[in-house]
Each structure stands twice: as structure tokens, then as C-alpha cells.
Amino acid sequence: MLVFLLSEIFERDLLLLKKEIAAYNSPGLLWKPVSGVKNPGGNLCLHLCGNLQHFIGHVLGGIPYIRNRENEFSASGIAPEVLLSEVDRTILSVKGTLAKITEGDIQKDFPSEMSGRKVSTGFFLIHLSTHLNYHLGQINYHRRIADS
């Protein structure tokens, strides 16, 4: 049941990410520096997609993916359509992987450590969900300031 619920939450929140990216008044605003906000919405979108495709799709699901974390924060000027396609790829990666995870699997250790310690797969998935929501809120905040 928990795996199903997490899958639904990830899909819901990734669809919200798409809405936030599409809601920017102009493509350039996705990358606009805003006082008091460290990362613009475009970079946060790339970061979320890279994070989820790496940890869920690749590490947990074995889906080929090479993450470029540095690029997630340094890229600029990528068209909204490209970002939205990346979110779609992320949804497929996350949903496809979680569809193969059993309730027993979430009790097992996640294949990589978190901050130098072993945690269960369930714990790590919940962590990834809260991480997604944290940055989703930052994107919403950035968009509202950048659009004003």
C-alpha cells in the first residue's frame, strides 16, 4: 500500500511541477536571478528531475541514467518545452520503477547511503518526496517574484 501511495504522490507532485514551469509568464523568467532566492525555477526543475531519475530510476530501478548534478545548477536558457519533457521522462522513470517495488522491498536498505548511513528504501522514498515538495515550493516562490 505504501509503494502505491508514494507512486501517486510522486506523480501528483511532478504534475504540479509541470504546472509551475508552464505558469511562468515568459521563458526567460525561468532563469531570472531573484534577490534572496539562490536558484531559479529552471535550475530547480532540472535538479528535481536529475535527483529522482538518479535515485529512483537508476539506483533503485536500474534504468540507465547519467546524472550531471553540476549542470542542474549551472544550466540556463533551456526552453520550457524541454523542461516539461524532462519532467515527463521523470514521471515515467519514477512510476515505472515504483511499479516493480514490493511492500517487502521498502523495508530493505536503500542501495546507496544517505548522509553516510544506511536507511530503508521506504525512508529514502519519503525523503525524496519531501525534497521534491521543498523545491516545488521554492519554484512557486521564485515564479511569483520573477513574474511580478
Image (cartoon, rainbow, N blue to C red):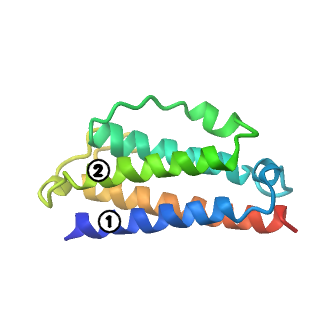
**Res. 22 image quadrant:** bottom right
| 2 over 48 or under it: above or below | below
Where does the C terminus fall, quadrant-wise?
bottom right
Q: Relative to the observer, which residue lies in front, 129 or 7?
A: 7
**Res. 78 image quadrant:** top right
**Where in the figure is residue 106, as x and y percent of width and height?**
20, 56
Q: Mark 2 highlights which residue? A: 96
The residue positioned 82% from the left and 66% from the top of the image is 145
Is 142 placed left or right of 21 in the picture? right
**Where in the figure is residue 42, as x and y percent of width and height?**
68, 49
The residue positioned 42% from the left and 55% from the top of the image is 128
Amino acid carrying mark 2 in the image:
Gly
| Number of other residues with Cα within 10 Å of mark 1, as a class: few under 14, some 14 to 19, many 20 or more | some
Question: What's the CA distance linking mark 2 and mark 1?
Answer: 13 Å
Where does the N terminus fall, quadrant-wise?
bottom left
The residue positioned 36% from the left and 47% from the top of the image is 93
| 35 over 133 or under it: above or below | above
Mark seen at residue 6: 1
Q: Earlier in the sequence, mark 2 or mark 1?
A: 1
Is 60 placed left or right of 71 in the picture? left
**Res. 62 image quadrant:** top left
